[in-house]
Image (cartoon, rainbow, N blue to C red):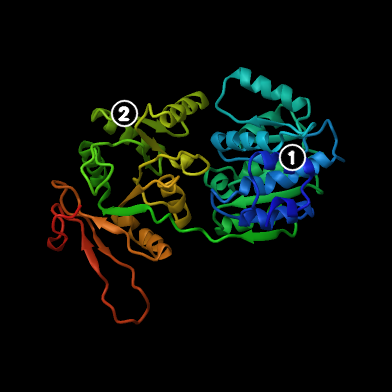
Amino acid sequence: MTFEETYLNDNILDALYDMHFEEMTPIQERCIPKILDGRDVLGVAQTGTGKTAAYLLPILSMLDDGGYPDDAINCVVMSPTRELAQQIDQAMEGFSYYLQNVSSIAVYGGNDGSRFDQEMKGLRGGAPVVIATPGRLLSHLKVGNLDLSRTSFFVLDEADRMLDMGFSDDIMQINALLPKHCQKVMFSATMPSKIRELAVSLLNNPVEVKLKVSRPAEKIRQMAYVCYDPQKVGIIEHLAKSHISNLNSQTSNFKRVIIFCGKKDRVKEINRTLQKLRINCAPMHSDLSQAERDEVMYRFKAGQVDVLVATDIVARGIDIDDISMVINYDVPHDSEDYVHRIGRTARADRDGMAITFVSDRDILRFQKIEQFLQKEVEKLPLPEGLGEGPEYKAAPSGKGDGKKHRRYHGRAHGRKDRGKKG
């Protein structure tokens, strides 16, 4: 289905034509007409499916058609992170190119006082569209810099990530300030019970649009080390010292790598370890100021940093095409998060690798990921000198099929039947 087959207005269609947008993605095809019809929407779709356009295009089209107060904040888009807020704002610039009276302001924390003052002036003037992180928006609300009593549209982007980051109370406080007639759209990559509960609290008889999570690209070579937590640093050191970015060759090139960690303390620890090995690396976590995070991302994208050590703050919404390897220092919480993380590699027709460290406590979780993948991820033998890893019992392929569960021990020299492979 093409965008012209919807009733998006001509100004929006002209912008899409300039941007070479013709065919809608599945999430756009199913969401845009419903939002244009005035329905609340609950969308479940992973990053990369076109969800930003799925909610921005119909809202911008309706705002441009008129009938909304010129001095009000007509739309609020909530984002879990500054980086995603910036990307939504950039998309807004393209989509609204031909719109005369529809502009946006991005509001997010981690900046100096001058930035806050600039945001205050924009908000008090009545910005048609505000793109904001929850904490920063609340800060402006508390000092009276904006009024949401006449807001017509409210969007929660990556709602699951917002809840994971502890923004539930903030969201409810903001929602309480919205008028009853406000149309609401909520997008989430996953649908745990807490997201379902949030949707019931916020949305009015929503249309639910759910896309199945795509499996990782076939070009990603997926591997895992089965290890104990204390062995993980040793594996990182082995990979860094070996400088291997392609395990099928001996290319000395430990570059364009992202190492994902579940906690910021681990990010700092691994970054220090790599620095001692003289690896050109940089950390990315919530303790950094906005200016520091922007600088790290700029340097990494420009190739000035070889290895980015990060929390999930960059797992979604950040597009970097030339990542050669993703290392999961911790097993992601679920299959969707695994797909988001390793999806940073093997883009733009490139090959890529994803290596996951599976501790004894994470074996069952990783087996669920394998079940989702419908394949067993290749297990690599532990580097020499690290000792033996935990036993890995593969999940049964079916109940009562009589098959024995295969077992695997990570050993210093690997198993004999693996020969010299790897």
- 420 with respect to 407 (left or right): left
User: At 20% from the left edge and 54% from the top edge, which residue is drawn?
Assistant: 381
User: Tag 1, which secondary structure?
Assistant: strand
Can you say which quadrant of the picture contains the N terminus? bottom right
Task: Name the quadrant containing residue 104.
Answer: top right
Q: Is residue 395 above or below residue 74?
A: below
Q: Residue 152, can we see it?
A: no
Residue 207 rendering spot, x and y as whole percentages: 71, 60
Circle 2 crowding by C-alpha within 10 Å: few under 14, some 14–19, many from 20: some
Residue 112 rendering spot, x and y as whole percentages: 57, 20
Lower sequence index among marks 1 and 2 = 1
Mark 1 and 2 residues: CB-CB less than 8 Å, in contact?
A: no
Name the kind of residue labelled 1 in the image: Cys
Residue 404 rendering spot, x and y as whole percentages: 26, 76
Q: Which residue is mark 1?
A: 75
Residue 147 rendering spot, x and y as whole percentages: 78, 33
Q: Which residue is mark 2?
A: 280
In the image, 293 versus 149, the foreground residue is 293
- 283 with respect to 68 (left or right): left
Name the kind of residue labelled 2 in the image: Asn
Q: Is residue 159 above or below residue 294?
A: below
Count of numbered labels shown in the rendering: 2
